């Protein structure tokens, strides 16, 4: 066969046929005809034109057929071919890739396109001298506009008449280059050894790039997409920048965009704005040291959400990157348009909107307030928003719940940033621990906890602290430990909002119940609170009658002295005597130890009666119930009761006096009027005091005490006991006329008491006088008898005269006594009437009933016109009478 | 002129490079199971360089091969029918 060079295609074709068919030239005529016909016809390309894709396909096919070694070999050869080819393209060294896997398209990017373009013109200029310029320029023309040139069978014809072997060689090289690079660019052979990388022609197959090659002012969608991806992260893009004046993203004015692109870009830019807002908040808060745990968990939750958002952004970015790397193989359209972004970012936009709204709402809040703010946002109908906010809420409330559990189970409060709703006052000492140390910080109460729950929580922690510090009891109740171990704040935080909070309530209730029960147990067992309460009643409220009476008996001579002469130790001694002599001795020594005498402040003119008081010492946990105010109330009540008792005592004395002297004084007939008067007055007073005592003892003390006792027995926690006790004292005080409203009544009563004392002294004086008179008369009679017995005159005239003088004087003093008594009576009755009037106008029912009892036979009513005014519908007279 | 000198200086290398390239091509065609030997391959390359549509060329070659097969069968039948 002739050398294949320099043969026409027909000749070559014929030799091909010969070779394949294995026959001589003459026999292949038929096939040759057929071949010519086929080749001459217009063949539409069905095979992929992209060399890189073809190579990839081949490799894939080889690996699929499990010929990996062959695939590797193939890529190696391919690479070598490329390198062989590229060694000729020294002018284009920087543009050509060394890596077989990157495509020739790599250097055909918009940035490098002008470069290639220029360089292409250089060799074309150089080679135009040696070769037909038409060929090259025609190449140039072909590569710049439009569709790939048809297989120009004409061109080879043009280039063939080349000079000499050197050119032949060059042609061959060119031919080799052409063949390796593309099937459709045979025209490359017309160039010099510095072949034109035909890949540049590929640029024409990408119409998209046409736009880029156009003007620099117009902003394409692709550039916008890139910008938007930056804006999503809050970074200003090339065309879209943040304008702080309007607080929004704006497209730069000079870029001419069509309206729809601009609008879509603006809509997408909103996402960037939302992102910025959230980011700003979290960044600010991370610098703020006093933000507290709740706030930090909120920021962490926001961060988590932002991370998801960033993940989406990175996916979008990688999509963009991939496109840039691969070029146009995905078709004529890029897969990232503004519309696609709009659709893909719809969900994240909703999420970010919710988060931004949350951030707005939560500005400037911290602690429990922050949790409430987030909770407010769960009340929405949109299920996705609700689940998002609930998730955030569960994270945010986790610190609150852990505070809570710590507080409930251990009584510890470590709240450096004041986020919890229980506040502790460090300045308060242990004696006021229960009342003052722990308070509710209402602003920090989260809205998902009710006030009742919070109060219970406060109580539980308070009880634990109380046990530890005041009762010195370190052992927590067993059940509480068991529950504490099973508490898991994070799980509970999530459950809290899904299971209607019943389990949570149950936990709090259980802790409350256990702790309070334990506390009451300790108080009763170790500190015998109830016993002390009863003791106070017995001694301070004069419950132990025999003891009080005996005490009064013993004290009477002492207390009659002026107050300044009294000594405490004397009185204490008397107290102890009284205790030993009565049933009080059977009380526990703990109680008796606390009983004491107290001398009140002495004002001038006081007798012992005014300054004497009993006292009951309390300390430790008991002092929480019997606080200092309580004790002072008790003392006042004691004072009152003591006074009333004294009146009773006095009247008893008067009665005694009457009974003792009645017989004797029968011998003084003129005296009987006075005596009678005395009796009447005394009876009146007795009646009065009797009724008062009845009232005090039964209606006031007994009833209130009964109520108190019931409540204390049923009490579930210490607060109940304290409240019941204070209610008890309040009732007692108001009913004993000791509170501020009843001052008038109290004064009246005091006046009555004064009258009684007055009577006592008057009566004493009268009786003394009478008795003296009687004594003298008896003496006189005795003397007379004696003298007569001696045989003398019984009485001398002078003595008789003296005697009758004295008797006359006595008889004259009687009217004085009578008038004295009468004045006293009158005064007394006036006071009582006044008292009755005040009683009937008092708001307290039992006092009004007292007035009925006092005036049962309307004795006073007859005398007092004001009492005759009819009572109103409620049995109460108006106070203006 | 400079370019031609450059190409001329590269000329002694090019022959060996050409042969290397040719060997590469042969290797590749072997991997791809084209069934082309060196001569046929070089004819094909030349034809393509001269502007023949390679797809058309490959279909021609396939046809020719089919014809060869048919002929072989015919001959086989012919020789064996005797």
Image: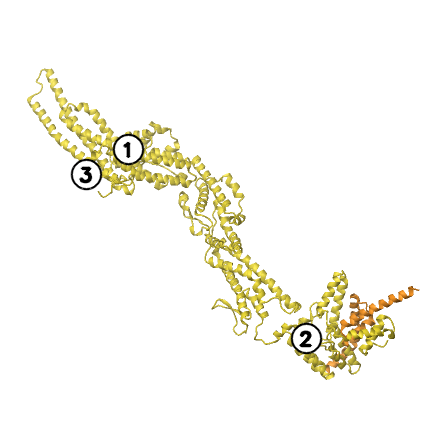
Q: Circle 3 — which element?
A: helix
The chain coloured yellow is A
Instruction: Please give the name of the residue rendered at 13% of the width and 26% of the height, measured from the top-left corner.
Output: A670
Q: CA distance from mark 3 to mark 1?
A: 27 Å
What residue sits right under mark 1 in the picture?
A693
The chain coloured orange is B
Same chain? Circles 3 and 2: yes
In depth, the one of A168 and A327 nearer the eye is: A327
Q: Please report whichever mark, 3 or 1, sits nearer to the chain's N-terminal start.
A: 1
Instruction: Please give the name of the residue rendered at 73% of the width and 67% of the height, measured from the top-left corner.
Output: A55
Q: Residues within 10 Å of mark 2 (few under 14, many from 20)?
A: some
Q: Residues within 10 Å of mark 1 (few under 14, many from 20)?
A: some
Q: Are marks 3 and 1 in contact (CB under 8 Å)?
A: no
- Report whether residue A160 is seen: yes
Same chain? Circles 3 and 1: yes
Q: Quadrant of the C terminus of chain A?
A: top left
Q: Which quadrant of the figure has residue A3?
A: bottom right
Q: Please report whichever mark, 1 or 2, sits nearer to the chain's N-terminal start.
A: 2
Please tell me whether mark 1 or mark 2 is closer to you in this view: 2
Q: Please report whichever mark, 3 or 2, sits nearer to the chain's N-terminal start.
A: 2
Residue A531 position, x and y percent, is 39, 34
What residue sits right under mark 3 in the picture?
A865
Chain assignment, label 1? A
Q: Quadrant of the N terminus of chain A?
A: bottom right
Please tell me whether mark 3 or mark 2 is closer to you in this view: 2
Q: Circle 1 — which element?
A: helix
Please tell me whether mark 3 or mark 1 is closer to you in this view: 3
- Report whether residue A620 is seen: no
């Amino acid at each position: 066969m002739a050398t294949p060079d320099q043969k026409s295609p027909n000749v070559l074709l014929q030799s091909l046929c010969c070779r394949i068919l294995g026959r001589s030239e003459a026999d292949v005529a038929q096939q040759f005809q057929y071949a010519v016909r086929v080749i001459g016809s217009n063949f539409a390309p069905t095979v992929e034109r992209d060399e890189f894709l073809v190579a990839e396909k081949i490799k894939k096919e080889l690996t699929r057929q499990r010929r990996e070694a062959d695939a590797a070999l193939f890529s190696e050869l391919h690479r070598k071919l490329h390198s062989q080819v590229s060694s000729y393209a020294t002018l284009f060294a920087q543009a050509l890739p060394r890596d077989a896997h990157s495509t020739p398209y790599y250097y055909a990017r918009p940035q490098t396109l002008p470069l290639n373009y220029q360089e292409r013109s250089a060799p074309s200029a150089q080679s135009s001298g040696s070769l037909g310029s038409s060929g090259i320029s025609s190449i140039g023309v072909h590569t710049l506009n439009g569709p790939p040139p048809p297989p120009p069978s004409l061109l080879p014809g043009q280039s063939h008449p080349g000079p000499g072997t050197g050119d032949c060689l060059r042609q061959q090289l060119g031919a080799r280059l052409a063949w390796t690079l593309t099937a459709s660019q045979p025209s490359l052979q017309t160039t010099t050894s510095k072949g034109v990388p035909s890949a540049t022609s590929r640029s024409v197959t990408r119409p998209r790039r046409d736009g880029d090659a156009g003007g620099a002012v117009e902003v394409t969608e692709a550039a916008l997409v890139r910008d938007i991806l930056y804006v999503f992260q809050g970074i200003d893009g090339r065309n879209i920048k943040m304008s702080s004046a309007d607080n929004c993203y704006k497209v730069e004015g000079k870029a001419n965009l069509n309206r729809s692109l601009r609008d879509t870009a603006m809509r997408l830019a909103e996402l960037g704005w939302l992102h910025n807002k959230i980011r700003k908040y979290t960044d600010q808060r991370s610098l703020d040291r006093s933000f507290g745990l709740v706030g930090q968990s909120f920021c962490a939750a926001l961060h988590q959400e932002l991370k998801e958002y960033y993940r989406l952004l990175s996916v979008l970015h990688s999509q963009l990157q991939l496109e840039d790397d691969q070029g146009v193989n995905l078709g004529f359209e890029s897969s990232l348009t503004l519309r696609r972004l709009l659709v893909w970012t719809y969900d994240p936009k909703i999420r970010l909107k919710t988060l931004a709204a949350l951030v707005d709402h939560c500005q400037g809040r911290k602690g429990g307030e922050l949790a409430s703010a987030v909770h407010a946002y769960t009340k929405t109908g949109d299920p996705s928003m609700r689940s998002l906010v609930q998730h955030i809420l569960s994270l945010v409330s986790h610190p609150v719940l852990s505070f809570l559990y710590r507080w409930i189970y251990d009584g510890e409060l470590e709240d450096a940033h004041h986020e919890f709703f229980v506040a502790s006052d460090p300045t308060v000492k242990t004696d006021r621990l229960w009342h003052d140390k722990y308070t509710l910080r209402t602003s920090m109460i989260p809205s998902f906890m009710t006030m009742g729950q919070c109060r219970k929580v406060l109580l539980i922690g308070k009880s634990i602290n109380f046990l530890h510090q005041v009762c010195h009891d370190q052992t927590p109740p067993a059940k509480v430990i068991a529950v504490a171990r099973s508490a898991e704040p994070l799980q509970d935080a999530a459950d809290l909002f899904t299971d209607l909070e019943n389990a949570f309530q149950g936990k709090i209730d259980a802790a409350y119940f256990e702790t309070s029960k334990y506390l009451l147990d300790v108080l009763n067992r170790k500190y015998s609170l109830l016993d002390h309460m009863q003791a106070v009643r017995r001694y301070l409220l004069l419950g132990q009658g025999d003891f009080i009476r005996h005490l009064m008996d013993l004290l009477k001579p002492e207390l009659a002295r002026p107050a300044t002469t009294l000594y405490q130790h004397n009185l204490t001694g008397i107290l102890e005597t009284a205790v030993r002599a009565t049933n009080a001795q059977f009380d526990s020594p703990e109680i008796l130890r606390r009983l004491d005498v107290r001398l009140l402040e002495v004002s001038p003119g006081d007798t012992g009666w005014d300054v004497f008081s009993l006292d009951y010492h309390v300390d430790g946990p008991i002092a929480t119930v019997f606080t200092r105010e309580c004790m002072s109330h008790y003392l006042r009540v004691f004072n009152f009761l003591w006074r009333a008792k004294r009146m009773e005592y006095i009247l008893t004395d008067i009665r005694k006096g009457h009974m003792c002297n009645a017989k004797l004084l029968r011998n003084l007939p003129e005296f009987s009027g006075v005596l009678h008067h005395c009796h009447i007055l005394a009876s009146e007073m007795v009646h009065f005091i009797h009724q008062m005592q009845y009232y005090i003892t039964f209606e006031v003390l007994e009833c209130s005490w009964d109520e108190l006792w019931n409540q204390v027995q049923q009490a579930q926690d210490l607060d109940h006991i304290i409240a019941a006790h204070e209610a008890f004292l309040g009732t007692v005080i108001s009913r004993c006329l000791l509170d501020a409203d009843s001052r008038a009544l109290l004064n009246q009563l005091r006046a009555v008491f004064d009258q009684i004392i007055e009577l006592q002294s008057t009566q004493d004086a009268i009786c003394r006088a009478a008795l003296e008179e009687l004594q003298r008369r008896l003496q006189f009679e005795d003397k007379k008898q004696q003298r007569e017995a001696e045989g003398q005159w019984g009485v001398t005239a002078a003595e008789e005269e003296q005697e009758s003088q004295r008797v006359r004087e006595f008889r004259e003093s009687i009217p004085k006594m009578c008038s004295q008594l009468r004045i006293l009576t009158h005064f007394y009755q006036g006071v009582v009437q006044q008292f009755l009037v005040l009683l009937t106008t008092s708001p307290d029912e039992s006092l009004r009933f007292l007035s009925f009892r006092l005036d049962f036979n309307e004795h006073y009513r007859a005398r007092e016109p004001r009492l005759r005014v009819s009572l109103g519908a409620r049995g109460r007279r108006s106070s203006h009478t | 002129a400079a370019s031609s000198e450059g190409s001329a200086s590269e000329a002694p290398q090019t022959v060996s490079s050409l042969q290397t390239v040719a060997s590469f091509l042969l290797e590749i065609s072997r991997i791809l199971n084209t069934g082309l030997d060196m001569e046929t391959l070089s004819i094909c390359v030349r034809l393509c360089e001269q502007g023949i549509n390679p797809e058309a060329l490959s279909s021609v070659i396939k046809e020719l091969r089919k014809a060869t097969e048919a002929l072989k069968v015919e001959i086989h039948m012919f020789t064996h029918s005797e």
